[in-house]
Structure formats: C-alpha cells, structure tokens
Image (spheres, grey):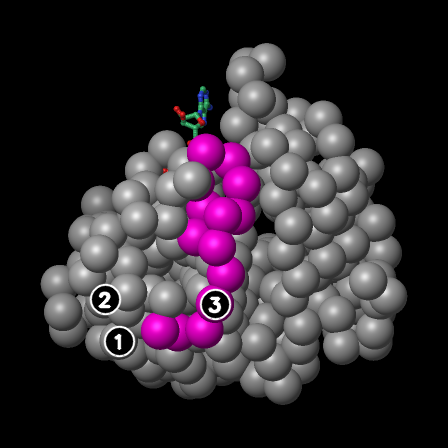
C-alpha cells in the first residue's frame, strides 16, 4: 500500500524474538491520524511484545519486517530516539523509580521532548504551573507530584500517572498496554475520560486490552485480534463485542 501523509504507524510483516524464541510472526498494522485502534487477544498472544518491539525495548529482537513512524523507518533507532520522534508507550507494569520525585521525572521527560523539538525548556516553577492543570485530566492529586515515581502508588494511581505522561508529551502515537487492568470502575472511567480528552485529529492511540470493558468507554475505530504472534482478525468496534460474548476460540483457524 502507498503511504499517505495521514499515516502515523505502518507496520509490515513484523517479526520478533525474545530470548531467541519467535513471538511475533508477521504482524501488519496501519494506523492513521485521528484513529483509535484496539488490539485484543488471549494472554501470551504477543500483545505486550508488539508494543515493546515498536518502542524499541532492548530485550526484544526484531528479526524481520518494517516499522514506519510518520513515514520514517524506525527499526534501527534507539528507544529514546523513537520516543522523541513521537512514540509513547504506557507499560502494562509501570516501574517504580525510588529517589526521583514525580515532578522531576515528568519535567525531565517533558524538557527532553521540548529540546528535541527546538522549543524552550521549562524551569521547575514554570513547569509546575503548566503541569498542575493537566492533573485534572486524569484526576490526580497534587500530592502525587512530590512522591517518588510510582513508589507506593496503587495500580490505578500508576496507570493515571502513565496517562499524565501521555498528556504532557503530546506524542503522535500512544500505545497503552492494559491500561485498564486492575482498575476499579471509577478509576477506569476517569482514565477512559482522560484518554478521550487526549484524542486529537493529529495523534493516534493503540489500546491493548484483554477485556472489552475499556471499550465501553472509549470507542475504537478499529479492533484487531492477536493470536500466536499474528493479527488474525480485524474489524470495527463490534468485533470487540463479539469477542466479549464468544471468546477468542471461534476466530482461530
Ligand atoms: P500478551 O501481552 O498478549 O499477554 P506477551 O507479549 O506478554 O503476550 O507474551 C507473548 C509470549 O512471549 C508469551 O509466551 C511470553 O511468555 C513470551 N515472552 C514475553 N516476554 C518475554 C520475556 N521477556 N522472556 C521470555 N518470554 C517472554
Ligand atoms: Mg501483555
């Protein structure tokens, strides 16, 4: 297929191994500006691996295929460079960073992005004034800012913190891996509302989710089912509802 200016992510026949074990076995996916895609599939089907290979995680080896981000091949780029070029990955299991305050961490990340775009870096006070209104997007209390990154945060708080990062960095492609897992319904609603607010005609979002429930709050434009390292079926939002009722088995060949 020819590339258009609206293409944010174009993944062609992506293959990858972990510890020499083939996990991704030829994934194709095209994501355009303004779209939300959901990737669903049973545990162990390769969803998290896919997100990490796109982000350039060093534990995963790309053994074939191509990844275009905004029409540029990024397979050989370091993860930091990919992030600066517009990929944001919210991990399924966000890490804790003892000794680093959340504000300092967020400011560092923000300023790296500012610098790479040739924009002004913000001093701590200016950054704080910029940051505080964004806390409302995800319903995070100001007291979180002085705490160490994710240290002692509940599952829901860690996930909100990831969405806060997403709000700050304004990446062109955000990949949210199981952002809904372990959330009670209030946290789920808050996070979903936050994600909906961050959707824009200029960016794209990939939601990786095992369950359909997140999609009750965020309507995806496309749903893809991953199974054994491949996308075995793609459709509209109805596909997720069908999976909710029927499970995944009916899709297997
Ligand atoms: P999903 O996110 O769909 O549940 P994953 O991408 O986490 O699936 O895992 C796909 C397969 O890759 C599983 O069989 C898993 O055991 C394996 N795998 C993923 N990460 C690693 C790793 N770091 N080391 C070894 N095996 C891994
Ligand atoms: Mg996973």
Q: Residues within 10 Å of mark 1 (few under 14, many from 20)?
A: few
Q: Do the residues labelled 2 and 1 touch (CB within 8 Å)?
A: yes
Which residue carries the number 3 mark?
A: 235
Of labels 1 and 3, earlier in sequence is: 1
Residue that badge 1 annotates: 216
Give the residue at x 47% y 67%. Answer: 235
Q: Give percent across and percent down for residue 81.
A: 75, 48
Q: How crowded is mark 2: few (under 14 residues within 10 Å), some or many (20 or more)?
A: some
Q: In which quarter of the image is residue 249?
A: top left
7 vs 245, nearest the viewer:
245
Q: Position of residue 222 (x, y in %)?
A: 50, 70
- How far is disc 2 from disc 3 in space, using C-alphas? 17 Å
Residue closer to the observer: 107 or 222:
222
Q: Give the range drawn in magenta.
A: 225-238
Residue wearing tag 2: 213
Which quadrant: the C terminus? top left
Residue 43: image location, x then y, percent: 32, 38
Which mark is first along the chain, 3 or 2? 2
Q: Can residue 4 be seen in this view?
A: yes
Residue 44 horizontal/vertical position (percent): 37, 33
- Image quadrant of ligand 1? top left
Q: Is residue 82 left or right of residue 161?
A: right
């Amino acid at each position: 297929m020819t590339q258009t200016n609206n293409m944010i992510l174009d993944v062609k026949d992506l293959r990858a191994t972990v510890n020499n074990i083939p996990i991704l076995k030829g994934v194709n996916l095209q994501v355009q500006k303004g779209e939300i895609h959901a990737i669903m599939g049973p545990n162990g089907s390769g969803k998290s691996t896919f997100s990490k290979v796109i982000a350039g995680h060093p534990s995963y080896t790309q053994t074939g295929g191509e990844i275009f981000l905004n029409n540029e091949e990024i397979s050989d780029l370091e993860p930091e460079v990919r992030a600066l070029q517009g990929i944001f990955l919210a991990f399924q299991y966000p890490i804790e960073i003892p000794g680093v305050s959340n504000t300092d961490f967020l400011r560092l990340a923000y300023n790296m992005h500012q610098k790479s775009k040739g924009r002004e870096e913000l001093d701590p006070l200016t950054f704080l004034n910029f940051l505080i209104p964004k806390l409302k997007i995800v319903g995070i209390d100001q007291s979180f800012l002085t705490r160490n990154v994710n240290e002692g945060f509940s599952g829901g708080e860690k996930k909100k913190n990831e969405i806060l990062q997403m709000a700050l960095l304004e990446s062109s492609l955000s990949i949210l891996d199981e952002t809904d897992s372990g959330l009670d319904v209030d946290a789920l609603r808050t996070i979903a509302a936050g994600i909906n607010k961050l959707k824009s005609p200029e960016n794209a979002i990939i939601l990786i989710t095992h369950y359909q429930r997140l999609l009750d709050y965020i309507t995806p434009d496309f749903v893809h089912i991953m199974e054994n390292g491949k996308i075995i079926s793609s459709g509209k939002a109805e596909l997720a509802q069908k999976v909710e009722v029927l499970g995944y088995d009916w899709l297997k060949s």
